[in-house]
Amino acid sequence: MTHTLKLPIHATPGARHTEAAGAHGTALRVRLAAPPVDGKANAALLAWAAQAFGVPRRQVELLHGTSGRHKTLAIHLPSPAALQAAQALVARWMSAEERF
């Protein structure tokens, strides 16, 4: 049984580094080092999310927003404890001014 975190994202492609950068309304702002062409920014976002949440890339899905800045990711986590840790990590990113 998997546990899924649905995460609203506001993506900003073309940044110097790929990183979580605080909140944008109710979404997590993620700056992406990839350009918004040929799906490169989406691929960078999915790779970043997999690394950030410690899951294989195949456990991260782009549910909505393939061609826009507003996206929704689904991150499939292996346990309730992993889901709780992921939620705490997102809360930390959303409330912080520093970059991750």
Image: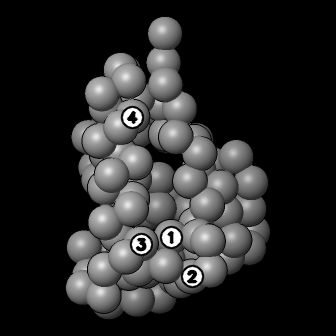
Q: Nearer the viewer, residue 51 or 7?
A: 7
Q: Nearer the viewer, residue 100 or 66?
A: 100
Residue at 37% x, 76% y: name it: 95
Distance between the alpha carbons at the discs numbered 2 and 3: 8 Å
The residue carrying mark 1 is 28
Q: Secondary structure at mark 3?
A: helix
- Residue 90 appears at what percent x and percent y? 39, 59
The residue carrying mark 3 is 94
Which numbered dot is residue 81? none
Q: Earlier in the sequence, mark 1 or mark 4?
A: 1
In the picture shown, does residue 49 fall above or below 36? above
The residue carrying mark 4 is 83
Q: Secondary structure at mark 2?
A: strand
Q: Secondary structure at mark 1?
A: strand
> On the picture, is 65 further left or further right than 59?
right
- Residue type at mark 1: give it: Leu
Q: For mark 1, does the 10 Å Cα neighbourhood hold few (<14), some (14 to 19), or many (20 or more) residues? A: many
- Residue type at mark 4: give it: Leu
Distance between the alpha carbons at the discs numbered 3 and 4: 16 Å
Q: Nearer the viewer, residue 9 or 82?
A: 82
Which mark lies nearer to you, 1 or 3?
3
- Residue 97 appears at what percent x and percent y? 30, 88
- Residue type at mark 3: give it: Met
- Residue 43 appears at what percent x and percent y? 50, 57
> On the picture, is 6 further left or further right than 87?
right
Q: Quadrant of the C terminus?
A: bottom left
Q: Earlier in the sequence, mark 1 or mark 3?
A: 1
Q: Secondary structure at mark 4?
A: helix
Distance between the alpha carbons at the discs numbered 1 and 4: 17 Å
Q: Earlier in the sequence, mark 2 or mark 3?
A: 2
Which numbered dot is residue 24? 2
